[in-house]
Amino acid sequence: MDHETSMIVIKRKGIVRVICKNPKHKQRQG
């Protein structure tokens, strides 16, 4: 279970966007 490889966090101008590469992680965020 590697959260860093399956999830990408992008910070831009105070906006944080989380992109999940794993479809299974899409249901469970945070």
Image (tube, rainbow, N blue to C red):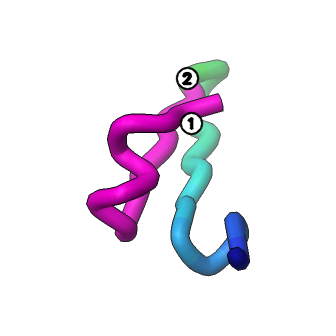
Of 13 and 26, which appears nearest the observer?
Answer: 26
Residues at discs 1 and 2 in contact (Cβ within 8 Å):
yes
Q: Is 23 covered by the magenta stretch?
A: yes
Q: Quadrant of residue 8?
A: bottom right
Of 1 and 6, which appears nearest the observer?
Answer: 1
Furthest toward the top, the residue is 14
16, above or below 11, in the image: above
Classify the position of the C terminus by image quarter: top right
Classify the position of the N terminus by image quarter: bottom right
Q: Is residue 2 left or right of residue 15?
A: right
Q: Is residue 22 left or right of residue 15?
A: left
Q: What range of the chain is rendered magenta?
A: 16-30
Q: Secondary structure at mark 2?
A: strand
Q: Is residue 21 left or right of residue 15?
A: left
**Residue tagged 1:** 12
* Residue depicted at x 61% and y 79%: 5
Of 29 and 7, which appears nearest the observer?
Answer: 29
- Residue 12 x %, y %: 56, 36
Residue 25 is labelled as none
28, above or below 19, in the image: above
- Report, in whole angstroms, how far the alpha carbon at label 1 lies from the one at label 2: 5 Å
Of 9 and 26, which appears nearest the observer?
Answer: 26
Q: Residues within 10 Å of mark 1 (few under 14, many from 20)?
A: few
- Residue 13 x %, y %: 59, 26
* Residue depicted at x 49% and y 36%: 28
**Residue tagged 2:** 15
- Residue 4 x %, y %: 71, 70
Give the residue type at disc 1.
Arg
29, above or below 20, in the image: above
